[in-house]
Amino acid sequence: METANTESSLFPTYARYPISLVKGKGSYLWDDKGNQYLDFMSGLAVTNLGHAPDRVIAKVKDQLDELWHVSNLFHIPAQEKAAALLTANTCADAVFFCNSGAEANEAAIKLARRYQQKVLGNDRYEIVTFKQSFHGRTLATLTATGQDKVKEGFLPLPEGFVHVPLHDIPALKEAIGPHTAAIMLEMIQAEGGIHIVEPAFLAEVKALCEEHGLLLIMDEVQTGMGRTGKLFGHEHYGIEPDIFTVAKGIASGFPVGAMLGKGYLREAFTAGSHATTFGGTPLAMSAVLATVETILEDNLPARAAEMGDYLIESLRTKLIDQDFVTEIRGQGLIVGIECKEAVGDIVLAGQKKGFLFVTAGPNVIRFLPNLYVTKEEIDTAVSLIAILIEEHVAAKGPLGGE
Ligand SMILES: *Cc1c(COP(=O)(O)O)cnc(C)c1O
């Protein structure tokens, strides 16, 4: 028998960094030893309002004293209100609340199939997704994901998913057949390396959906809630999805996901067709309402656009002579610095300097600051990343020597 891990009672599903964070406020986090960190990852695009936002805290605290949970067998006024707020500010007409991004995507996949099969009477079930995409870790959503590493050891996978390269129209056309129900994509492939969908490609995808009677599903779990400089990423394109999904930034860290869709899809999700115990509880909805109201009232998408431009410009200016960097790309406050080699070491070195960020694929440094980030904080981050890259290059020696 192997020696038991005596240090933790958790399954070792995460390669955790050697830091225990215990407190946060705005753009900063503190660990159990009192060290301060500038946070440019925001819990992976979750704490879009910064840590411990006062308005959300106040609303959730009030709700804590009133009522946490009731079954969805009853009317939940806060759920109605949150849904109305979302539909009033998006192209969607109806919302289903759940607890995570993967669940929101599961709901989207189920709704697309059921609309095709029960409402239109078709034999359509297949969902076309894209290579390098990320849609979650449930069996259906990891199958939808266009990355083999998340599928290893989990066979057999559910049927009905095909993957084509992003921006490859001929491959997409070839993938569409008599059983295709929907095309599903992220507006920016975030986990896949910060790849922004080209407008001409999305227009073609939309046209193909209309031509073949397919639903267009957009996974806005990472790009939603103001991060890209619009409330939702698809607003940059002027193209409306039939269904889109949200989670990460919708409730400031309270676990909430949502699937939003057009009114004609209501017919497919009739009573009893889909459900979840915890989706849309009064407590969860207090966090959603306070978060979404703040994003709208403080015009945070516009702020994300302005600060994102400043961040990208500053990075380009600062890193212009750095051969290790091959491209800087992003939209709003989702920004990638693509490098020639793996950047995992740079993330660890950043933590030692009190600066938190993540990767997006092996070679891309990903910045996801909160939407209130200041120019001063961006200046600090840009100076730090320049030093970190310089030190990395100095330690590793000349490039291309692998
Ligand atoms: C994070 C993410 C998911 C999965 O969300 P969970 O809440 O972890 O289930 C799905 N799609 C995209 C684009 C994501 O970034």
Image: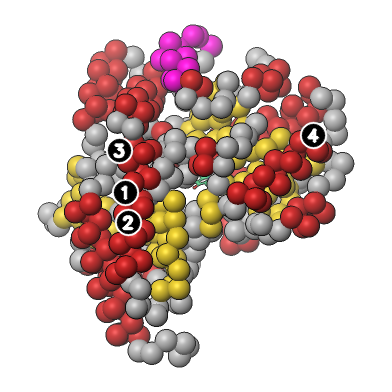
Q: Amino acid at mark 3?
A: Leu
Q: In this figure, which residue is indicated by the disc labeled 3?
A: 49
Q: Amino acid at mark 1?
A: Met
Front residue of this view, candidates 158 and 104: 104
Q: Amino acid at mark 4?
A: Gly
**Rounded to the nearest whole Å, what is the CA distance between mark 2 and mark 1?**
6 Å
Q: In the rendered image, which quarter is residue 351 located in?
A: bottom left
Characterize the local packing of mark 2: few (<14), some (14-19) or many (20 or more) Cα atoms within 10 angstroms. Answer: many
- Percent x, y of residue 334: 41, 52
User: Which badge, 4 or 2, comes first in the chain's sequence?
Assistant: 4
User: What secondary structure is found at the residue carrying circle 3?
Assistant: loop
Q: In this figure, which residue is indicated by the disc labeled 1?
A: 307
Front residue of this view, candidates 153 and 127: 127
Q: Amino acid at mark 2?
A: Leu
Residue at 31%, 54% in the rendered image: 310
User: Which badge, 4 or 3, comes first in the chain's sequence?
Assistant: 3
Question: Quick check: marks 2 and 1 in contact, CB under 8 Å?
Answer: yes
Q: In the rendered image, which quarter is residue 213 located in?
A: top right
Q: In this figure, which residue is indicated by the disc labeled 4?
A: 213
Q: Nearer the viewer, mark 4 or mark 3?
A: 4
Q: Is residue 155 above or below residue 140?
A: below
Q: Nearer the viewer, mark 3 or mark 1?
A: 1
User: What secondary structure is found at the residue carrying circle 2?
Assistant: helix
Residue 311 badge = 2
Residue range highlighted in magenta: 73-86
User: Which badge, 3 or 1, comes first in the chain's sequence?
Assistant: 3
Taking 231 as reference, is 310 left or right?
Answer: left
Q: Is residue 398 above or below residue 68?
A: below
**Rounded to the nearest whole Å, what is the CA distance between mark 3 and mark 2?**
18 Å
Front residue of this view, candidates 169 and 394: 169
Q: Nearer the viewer, mark 4 or mark 2?
A: 2
User: What secondary structure is found at the residue carrying circle 1?
Assistant: helix
